[in-house]
Image: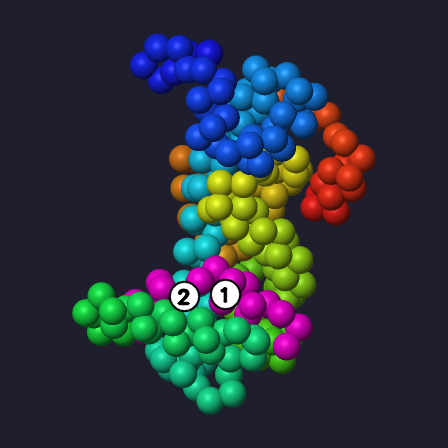
């Protein structure tokens, strides 16, 4: 195996760097073939890298559209309104975002708070507890290409899958066992509802379709692992 500058890299050294537990997953998928396991690990890394662009565009467009709509309906500091945040962890996430901003010796302005809030904070806005707010206000965040309005459920299910994908990529975990083309299409579609311009920019600069193999990714599946993957499709 050749390294980035053309020098040989030993499988043993790479396995040690990755940890046996992490690399073991790829060895299982490769049915014990170390060369194939390295190929799968490399592919997972390249695919994860390519998904950063659509993930970024969706997250930024989502939080900004929610903020714009809620600012128009309430005020720029809408997240401070008593009783508005209904998600179980949202008040704590808000407090932590403000704390982190202040720790950097900056004023916690609404814009900085919006940027500091986690993706899970924003996806929580599509939970069933927010159905009333969706009907009155949040439905204004976007529209489908045919001009039809959006339902809360148009976002809630897909966003749960995208959040899981985002978290696994952020923690350098395997993702190649999932239906990634479907998740990519979902990200592009939702971003397009929020901002066609953002979706177009993301597609123009995203490398996912070039990196993802044309042929199916074949993974050897031990019985227990196969069940776990089926649950995550």
Residue 232 x, y percent position in the rendering: 70, 46
Disc 2 from disc 1: Cα separation: 8 Å
Q: Is residue 155 visible?
A: yes
Query: Looking at the figure, which quarter contains the C terminus?
Result: top right
Is 131 left, or right, of 69 in this rendering? Answer: right
- In the rendered image, the vertical position of residue 73 relative to residue 155, given as above or below: below
Which residue sits furthest bottom?
A: 82
Residue at image location 35% in from the left, 10% down from the top: 6
User: Which SS type dominates the magenta stretch?
Assistant: helix
Tell me whether circle 2 and circle 1 mark residues in contact (CB < 8 Å): yes
Q: Which residues are magenta?
A: 110-129
SS assignment at label 2: loop
Q: Circle 1 is placed at which residue position? A: 122
Mark 2, residue position: 117
- Residue 87 in the image: state x and y as whole percent: 56, 75
Residue situated furthest left in the rendering:
105
User: Compared with residue 10, is residue 63 higher up or lower down, i.e. above or below?
Assistant: below
């Amino acid at each position: 195996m050749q390294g980035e500058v053309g020098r040989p890299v030993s499988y043993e050294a790479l396995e040690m760097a990755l940890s046996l537990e992490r690399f073991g997953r790829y060895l299982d998928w490769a049915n014990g073939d170390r060369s194939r396991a390295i190929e799968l690990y490399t592919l997972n890394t390249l695919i994860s890298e390519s998904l950063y662009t659509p993930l970024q565009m969706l997250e930024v467009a989502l939080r900004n559209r929610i903020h714009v709509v809620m600012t128009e309906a309430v005020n720029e500091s809408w997240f401070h309104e008593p009783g508005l945040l209904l998600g179980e962890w949202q008040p704590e996430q808000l407090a932590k975002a403000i704390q982190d901003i202040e720790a950097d010796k900056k004023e916690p302005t609404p814009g900085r708070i919006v940027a500091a809030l986690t993706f899970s904070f924003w996806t929580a806005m599509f939970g069933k507890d927010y159905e009333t707010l969706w009907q009155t206000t949040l439905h204004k965040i976007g529209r489908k290409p045919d001009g039809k309005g959006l339902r809360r459920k148009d976002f809630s299910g897909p966003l749960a899958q995208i959040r899981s994908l985002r978290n696994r990529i952020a923690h350098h975990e395997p993702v190649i066992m999932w239906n990634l083309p479907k998740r990519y299409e979902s990200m592009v579609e939702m971003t397009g509802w929020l901002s066609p311009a953002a979706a177009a920019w993301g597609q123009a600069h995203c490398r996912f379709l070039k990196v993802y193999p044309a042929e199916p990714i074949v993974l050897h599946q031990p019985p227990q692992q196969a069940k776990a993957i089926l649950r995550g499709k």
